[in-house]
Image (cartoon, coloured by chain):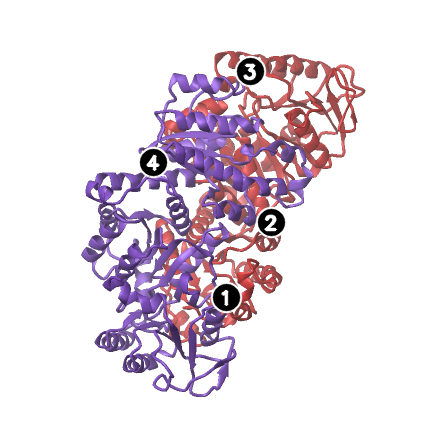
Chain colours: A purple, B red
Amino acid sequence: VSMISDRFEPLFNPNSVVFVGASRNPGKWGFIILANILNGGYEGRVYPINPKEKEILGLEVHSSIEGLPEIPDLAVIVVPPPSVPGVVAECVKKGIKAALVITAGFAEIGAEGERLQNETVRIARQGGMTMVGPNCQGIISISSKLHALMPPLFPPPGPLSIVSQSGNVAGTVARKCMSRGFGFSKYLSTGNEAALHCEDVFEYLAEDPETKVILSYIEGFKDGRRFLETAKRVTAKKPIVMLKAGGTIAGAKAAKSHTASLAGSDSIFDAVCKQAGVIRVRDMDELFYVGAALAGGFMPKGRRVGIITGGGGWGVLASDACAMAGLEVVELPEETIKELDTFLPSWWSRGNPVDLVAGLRPGDVQNSFEVLLACPNIDGVILLGLTPALPRHTDWLSSGGLERSGKINNIVLDEIGDVFSRLMDMAHSYGKALVVASEMPFETEMLQKIGERGGVCYTLPDQAAFVFASLARYAEYLRESDARTEAIPRCTGP
Amino acid sequence: VSMISDRFEPLFNPNSVVFVGASRNPGKWGFIILANILNGGYEGRVYPINPKEKEILGLEVHSSIEGLPEIPDLAVIVVPPPSVPGVVAECVKKGIKAALVITAGFAEIGAEGERLQNETVRIARQGGMTMVGPNCQGIISISSKLHALMPPLFPPPGPLSIVSQSGNVAGTVARKCMSRGFGFSKYLSTGNEAALHCEDVFEYLAEDPETKVILSYIEGFKDGRRFLETAKRVTAKKPIVMLKAGGTIAGAKAAKSHTASLAGSDSIFDAVCKQAGVIRVRDMDELFYVGAALAGGFMPKGRRVGIITGGGGWGVLASDACAMAGLEVVELPEETIKELDTFLPSWWSRGNPVDLVAGLRPGDVQNSFEVLLACPNIDGVILLGLTPALPRHTDWLSSGGLERSGKINNIVLDEIGDVFSRLMDMAHSYGKALVVASEMPFETEMLQKIGERGGVCYTLPDQAAFVFASLARYAEYLRESDARTEAIPRCTGP
């Protein structure tokens, strides 16, 4: 076990938790967070602290940290700001190794808050304590069934971890992932990062075998050079996808009052990301989109894209989006066109995008897909329109009453997972990338079926192009960093 | 009834329809489209034509157009390309006033197709016929319950109409609208626009009392000047929201092979849109987002925005997005801050964005909202996080098990429509705009409840900022065109 794991073990895998500021009032965070810990199924011991209560949510309440029957690994602290330094001091005195300070009202509100924050950090540091926050939303650690978090959020286990300077951004992203069938390993809201910085968490997650992809929301770094060096080491092992806020004057001002962050120059940050192999995204949707695609294990060897579409408009929008994302919508070689001619109807577009023009034979999508995968000029396929690939697509089309009822046909629900898996396996067997977007606004249930197989179905061609470009960029970064790619074998599929 | 209505009456409100190319095979469009007409509940007479069949889907089949017992208003044509000119000639001979040519394989596939297309147009023009297509997906006209369309798509009645050079883009956008509780009036896929151009449809929809907002997907115009002049006239009456594709070389190439469109210069198109008051959007989601917001009747008097957020990260992202969209995240006047101080907890951000920092009292959102609406420095509010406004928000938070079940609490479902309506009414009563985004990924059912009240809840702060800026731009355009704003009273709410 490395030094970094030592520091984080009591945080992510505590044997027991003391909860300081427990409340019987369901309208208080001191109740809600405790309820979430219990509802999450945490199996370690939980010690609520409240000098005035005997029992909360069925747990025995203790009146002081000092009097606890054991030394808990982790303290969750929700008392009002002025009490925080004293509570942290008691924790240190007891020998508690990690603290999560949820309470807000520190450096983000001005000079008085900053003084309180500095005092708290000083006490934690002197005691050798790992302190998260203050002004943070909490933690999820799936392996420990620990959900010490403000919102009731219970994601399934999965390949993603998130580190965020905003709890509500992390929550939004997690819910987006969950609604698409993707799960988490670790989730940490770092708040003001008074002591523990996001870079520390990146280092830990790089070593965490349960984390395949790191998602991150950042408003500012305390030390740009350290971020660059850390990120370089981490991205050699696994991807970091990052949403950075505060790039405008208005945003920077809001960031200062949110987490007391100094947002810094946006263009410098962009350059740092490029140098460190960090994949930067533009919004919370893209944080999930790109993260999920990377978890799928696709590493395209280049930027040459083949597009298959069930209708022309989507193909035109995808072509625009590819061009704008720096991808090449390649000319198809004569042999590829000839091969497609052998089975596609006469009116197909005879070029890239391969436009099936509302073709109705389900085999056409899969056969075209395989021809493009075999084409040596193509590094991956953007497939637009998943339903035409379904064996019973025309049954569904000709049974108009079913869509009308507001529910997508159960036929589609049954078939979609298998079809998706088969297409992903085909792409992997050719060592090429596959990104899928569909014109159907699939119900949550269908998206979850796809997500459970490790797939994502985007809802816009623009998203598919952006994701493909992000995969290509990370693959390029790793290829260019020879030393790194030699050290860790890649491109092997999921 | 104006001349333009005369031309379009047989298309959008036909008394009877002849369906040329009907099929008994459920795998053919000649079956599927006919089934959609019947499933849609069209109440006029339908005459399927097929020389080899006696009965399809319970309808008597006729062997020729000539032999029909009446002159239908509209012909829907799905026969193979070489037969199309002949069929159109028969329609003209019979006296049919409008034709919808679904069949593909014309100018978009090359010289031979173009010849066939020109011949078809010549025949239709000589016969004074209104011809849509070829290579189009079909039509929906809610007032006539007419769904002569390839996909089974049955939107409820509503304020939006769509004109699209791509059927599958129109279908995607319609499904997005429907899943958010928004309905349609007219839906037309114009295909190759060999005879009828989208400008004609814009003119018609400008007069259509059931259409409040026109959505449009365009790959190219036959006549840029005509588009400019038409759009100017139309946008004086109601907004046009437009997604234009083919702006890159790759996209322009795809557009040529899709609808034989010449996409033209993207920057010139941008300038034309500005001059004509057309609101240009970047993707299919935005087409719905902006259209739905305009249907809500908000016309902000300026670009000064107040932001209310339940958590800081969303506020920072929204501030960035506002700055990038050209909106001003204004300084709050001292009196406004003082008023908020009277009821918000001490740790609120004391600035704009008004960050409630995970505040738990539901009244805080509504009270802050009203204070911002009353603030003379603000033209509208971006409200981030709708759930904290719900009366029983904390019940929901402290009952963690409910979210876990995968279903948002029924409590939320019950309350959301009313809360949304109340907030919209408050904004209208102050003559200010309201745009809402929420960190909760609401289920379809909840979004529909909101949509039924004419509201939209966006899922990213970025979307909210973009929508607010679009509302502001259209309002500015109308103010600057004095003559237009004098002719038609506005800013009166929904």
Report which quarter residue A301 is drawn in.
top left
Left or right of residue B487, residue B10 in this image: right
Chain under disc 4: A
* Image location of residue B454, percent across then percent down: 59, 52
* A92 relative to B317, above or below: below
Marks 4/1: CA–CA distance: 43 Å
Chain under disc 1: B
Tag 2 secondary structure: loop
Q: Which residue is disc 2 drawn over?
A: B181
* Image location of residue B458, percent across then percent down: 49, 52
Q: Amino acid at mark 3?
A: Gln
Same subunit, tags 4 and 3: no
Q: Which residue is disc 1 drawn over?
A: B388
Same subunit, tags 4 and 1: no
Marks 2/1: CA–CA distance: 22 Å
Left or right of residue B208, residue A278 in this image: left
